[in-house]
Image (cartoon, rainbow, N blue to C red):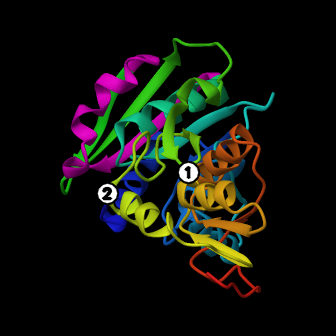
Amino acid sequence: MNVQVVNQIIERNLFRRDAGGNALWINPEKHTDWRAVGSRCNSLTLFSQDFGTCSELQNTGADVSFAALPENTADKYQWIIIRLPRQKALLKMLLACAAGCLAKDGVLWLAGENKAGIKSADKCLKSYFGQVRKLDNARQCTLFEAREVTHQHAFDITGYQEKWVLDCPPDDLKVVSYPGVFAHGRLDPGTALLLQALSGMELHGEVLDFACGAGLVGACIAARNRHVRVTFLDTNALALKACEDTLEANRLTGQIIASDGLSGLEESFDI
């Protein structure tokens, strides 16, 4: 996604917003100039599902949090901005969550590139909002505005879980995943190859499951080698949430770390 173009279409429409109120920006890019948006509201909270992006934004002085999803607090937002994700299932989950965070008279903006699927996003928006209109379309990028939440029930992330069973001799492994997690709801060929290579190995010591996703590889290792200590690492908060749920579903233990690459590690590993 062309970050600069998406940010530009947001900035060129800021004149439409009266100054004031509280705003939430979901998944801005790390190079986002959030100060322009911040000048149009009393307070701006940034939220990121990517640990590396969150760290970069923190370094600029932004009020930013890292988690699987924004907290649905009693204090509602008058303005929510969402950068279009690549996965439609993730967009639906984010919109459902945002609808629960939006004030009764609040407004939601959804921005993204045409080639990323933003043109068809209005259908998804209409599933959650009574009023949807296109605010702007420039440089192959579109900005939608939505109002009047039609779904007022509390958001529950478990409704978006994908659960399936992986053959991991001597037992089956229960896998939990969420939209936005790599290979959501399935076993991809690369992971299948890794599991096949590991099936005949006897492992010892400290093991790192790097870019763990839902934790399939590390969980299989932990299930087969109870004496091995497994650390799970990913930059995606939804992946870490899925990994945590996968371990819990199989009564396994492991250290779960959020890190952008290896930057968050101080330990050394045998595997």
Residue 233, image x and y in percent?
63, 67
Disc 2 target residue: 189
- Residue 129 within the segment the image draws in magenta: yes
Query: Residue 194's image quarter?
Result: bottom left
Residue placed under numbered mark 1 in the picture: 214
Screen quadrant of the N terminus: bottom left
Front residue of 127 and 234: 234
112 or 103: nearer the viewer: 112
Structural crowding at the residue carrying mark 1, measured as other residues with C-alpha within 10 Å and reported as few (<14), some (14–19) or many (≥20): many
Can residue 25 be seen here? yes
**The one of 133 and 2 positioned closer to us in this rendering:** 2
Instruction: Label 1: state its secondary structure.
Output: loop
Circle nearer the N terminus (1, 2): 2
Q: Is residue 64 left or right of residue 167?
A: right
Give the vertical position of 50 relative to 110 (above or below): below
Q: Is label 2 in a helix, a strand or a loop?
A: helix
Question: Whole-percent x and y of residue 132?
Answer: 36, 23
Q: Position of residue 83 (x, y in %)?
A: 43, 49
Q: Amino acid at mark 1?
A: Ala
Disc 1 and disc 2: Cα gap in Å? 15 Å
Residue 131 location, quadrant: top left
The answer to whether residue 132 is left or right of residue 177 is: left
Crowdedness near tag 2: few (<14), some (14–19) or many (≥20) residues, C-alpha within 10 Å:
few
Find the magenta span and give its range.
Answer: 104-131
Q: Residue at x 40, y 42 (%)?
A: 186
